[in-house]
Image (cartoon, rainbow, N blue to C red):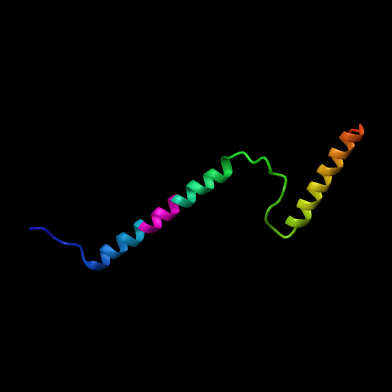
């Protein structure tokens, strides 16, 4: 004698499995983001001041490059 689950229980189990799947993907993505090396860490790519900060960063790089070319080293 086998008992079958009601339909609402099966629906809840399926919804829970889908949610768990997305939570695990989110956790994996978060761990990936927090542990990888970022060579461009000091350039903000999001937020209110992203364009401004990015421009300042590249202006500073240009200054350093031109100083190195002209023989003056910046601190």
Q: Nearer the viewer, residue 75 or 10?
A: 75
Extreme residue in the bottom direction: 8
In this orientation, does residue 74 appear? no
Residue 67 forms part of the magenta stretch: no
Q: Which residue: 20% across, 62% down?
A: 5
* Residue 52, quarter of the rendered image: bottom right
Quadrant of the image for the N terminus? bottom left
Q: Which residue: 26% across, 64% down?
A: 9
Lateral position of residue 17 relative to residue 58, left or right: left
In this orientation, does residue 22 appear? yes
Q: Which residues are magenta?
A: 18-24
Quadrant of the image for the C terminus? top right
Extreme residue in the left direction: 1
The rendered magenta stretch, by its main secondary structure, is classed as helix
Q: Which residue: 39% across, 54% down?
A: 20
Q: How many numbered dots are placed on residues in this image?
A: 0
Q: Position of residue 24 (x, y in %)?
A: 43, 50
């Amino acid at each position: 004698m086998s008992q079958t689950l009601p339909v609402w229980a099966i629906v809840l189990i399926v919804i829970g499995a889908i949610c768990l799947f997305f939570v695990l993907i989110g956790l994996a993505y978060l761990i990936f983001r927090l542990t990888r090396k970022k060579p461009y860490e000091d350039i903000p790519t999001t937020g209110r001041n992203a364009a401004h900060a990015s421009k300042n960063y590249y202006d500073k790089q240009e200054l350093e490059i031109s100083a190195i070319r002209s023989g003056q080293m910046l601190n």
